Structure formats: structure tokens, C-alpha cells
Amino acid sequence: NGLRDRVVVQADGQLKTGRDVVIAALLGAEEFGFATAPLVVMGCVMMRVCHLDTCPVGVATQNPVLRERFAGKPEFVETFFEYIAEEVREILATLGFRTLDEAIGRAEVLDTRKAVNHWKAKGLDLAPILHVADLGDAPRRQMIEQDHGLDRALDNELIALAAGVLEHGEGLRARLPIRNVNRTVGTMLGAEITRRFGGSGLPEGTVDITFEGSAGQSFGAFLPAGVTLRLEGDTNDYLGKGLSGGRLIVRPDDSAMFDASENIIAGNVIAYGATSGTILVRGKVGERCCVRNSGATIVVEGLGDHGCEYMTGGTVLVLGETGRNFAAGMSGGVAYVLDLEPLRINVEMVDVEVLDDEGRETVLQLLRLHGEETGSTVASALLAAGDQMAMLARFRRVMPRDYKRVLEAQARAVAEGLDPMAYVMGAL
């Protein structure tokens, strides 16, 4: 259909030699993914214990003793790929091609007779894979770069408004309209802030921008510290994806006639891969909220299936129903859930507990914060309850078992005046 020149095709899967690269190119690929081979070059001995934190050569481990055994150097990988490139050039020369680009999609030069004559491949018909379409003058590889429309992104306006912030660290307050065609709002601004001020970002509250309307996907993605984005309306999927210290506050417009706690106001996969920061949502959110969250604090008023999936850190407060399979693969972090339905919890890695004093204080702090920032009627009603202890008794803490062991070991180390990291590695 004449669109091949607009896409990039990548091949991967056990590529180890220059011959593998050339075959992939002849089949139509122009990018090549290497994984196992460079890993071996860096010292991997394929023990296949990556998930056990016991890698004997220090590649896949957080244990400082084992990591000292890592002997890999960038030069090893560089040399490996130089040999790959040399072999690619030699094979291309034998085929009559001057460059790899000339070989892309030229499947007609592949000779498969030896392969299909093997007894394991008897009767195998490779014709569909090796078929070369009649493209006429159309190119066989990417020739046209994709236009992402970044020159029309709302962030260009935000960056212009934040000139004083970027040059002198001044404060910024603004209010702007937003539509669902505005995606990843705040990400380009956050990138500029990170370039100028580093990973620590800006002091809390330096930038505070309020948007009115419906935001598109990935609102506030990768937002750094010092930036607060408020949304009066609703938003699509991936709110706060990769959040890196910023604050995102979502609430319905003041003129909305519906009860926010009974309606979904933000889409799926909220706080995916977030590392730090805060997200407060007055209303329900979709599925897979907080997947792979490793350090952010999130408050929502209900969520869909697979909440806190693969979560490794951070704190989540759910002021409403959860969907099915909550906490699947959750190895770290803590979740507090109001009126928890036990059958919806995946208990393979977590325990459900009543709140202790620390848990009660955490829930109260988050309720106050959520109520102040979003005007949540749910938070206000809970805080206004006559019997506060009875109200807090409605919450349950979802705690990963191994994570709890680590926290207890760290507490013992601190009490004994020892290094928590070294103590935990030795104790566990």
C-alpha cells in the first residue's frame, strides 16, 4: 500500500552474528536487536538465576558483594559489534551490495535449499516468508521520518510561559484550556527543567499550572519535582507515567453534575513506572493503576482490575472499590484500601493486615491532603466521622511479605547502629 517508507522494521531474537544481521536485513529489517550475545560479552555465564538476586558474576543482582565480581567493560561490547559489522560488510560484498540499505528487503537472494533439505524441515514451505512483493518504484526501507507534531504541542506554550523559571528559577502560576488532542502535557517542560536543574528538579511548588478540559494520554508523564499540574476535568490513559517527583491533581470541573466518586475520571495505567511524586484523583480510575510504581504516592477513589500490579515501592490509598486481581506480583510498596473485598486480592505475594499506629497516621495524612487538594467529598466524609478509630478500622493494609521482611531488617539495623543495606543483604 505504499507505506513501507514510513515505518522502521526491527528484528530481534537470538541475533549473534553478522550473518544473522544480513539475513534479517534481506527479510526486510533495518534495525537489529541484540541482547544475549552482548550480555555474554560483558561476563554473563547464563546461570539463569537473574530473578533470585544471586548472579555469580554480578550482572543481575543488587547484592554489593556479588556486584564487585562484575568484570565487564564498555570496550568489550564495542569490540564485539566491530566484529559484527566487519562480518556484515564481508557478506554484503559477496552478495554484490555496497551498503546494508541496499540489501533491505531483497529476499530473492536468500538460498534456502540447504535449510529445507534438512530432515527436520521436510515439507516446510517458506514461500510466504520469502515472497518479494512487486513494489515498483516504492522503497523497501524507511525514507520518511514520522512527524510527531511536536511543533504544535501545548508544551511549547508552557515552555514560553516558564521562561523565568528556566532562566532564574522564578515561580510560575497559570491557567490554560486543554483538549484530548494535547498529549504528554508537561513532559517537554519537565525535560527542559531537568536539563537546567538536574534530576532533583525545582523546589516544591515552583511551577503550578491549572488546566481546564479533557486531557489526552500521558498527562504529566515523567514530570520532575517542583512542578504541579492541576486538571479540572478528566484525562485519558497513562496519567503520571514515569512520574519523577512532580505533583498531579485531578478533579471534575466545578460545573460537573455527577458524583466524582461514582465515575471514572482518569483512564487506565495510572502512574505506570512512577518513581516519585504525588497523584491525587478525585474520582475512579481505570485498570492497571500503579503498575510498576516504585516510589510515588497515589490516592484514587476506586480502580479497575489489576491494581498495583508488579508494584515495587511507593504508597497507594484507595477510597473505594478495587477490581479483580489487586496486588498481583506486588513485591514492594504499601496499599491502603477502604472496605476491602478479600476475594479481589491476589494473595500470592501479599498479606492483608489491619492498620497499626503508623498505618493509621499515614491514612489520615493522605485523607487530609486529598481533601485539601481535590475537595473530595469522600475524604471529607471520612474525616468528619464521629468515631475516627471506627472509620480507620474500615481500612486494610496490603503488604508484600518479602518487602515487610526487608523493612523489619532495616529497622533492626538502624536500632543496632549498623548499615541498613549491608545488614539486609546479610540477613536475607
Image: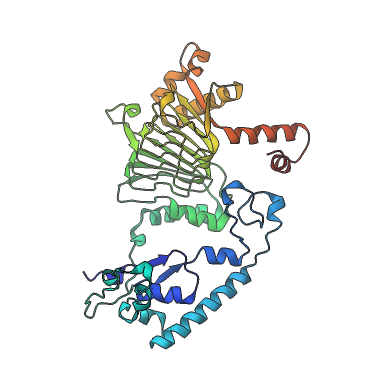
- Name the residue: 43% across, 87% down: 93
Q: Quadrant of residue 155?
A: bottom left
Task: Give the residue furthest to the top.
Answer: 386
**Looking at the figure, which quarter contains the C terminus?**
top right
Q: Nearer the viewer, residue 204 or 332?
A: 332
The answer to whether any part of residue 9 appears in the image is no
Image height of 321 relative to 109, above or below:
above
Point out residue 64 in the picture as x, y percentages from the top left corner: 70, 50
Left or right: 22 as drawn, with respect to 152 = right
Q: Nearer the viewer, residue 401 or 375?
A: 401
Q: Nearer the viewer, residue 89 or 153?
A: 89
- Name the residue: 39% across, 66% down: 10
Point out residue 326 in the picture as x, y percentages from the top left corner: 43, 33
Q: Quadrant of residue 231?
A: top left
Left or right: 283 as drawn, with respect to 365 = left
Point out residue 356 in the picture as x, y percentages from the top left corner: 59, 21
- Name the residue: 30% across, 72% down: 5
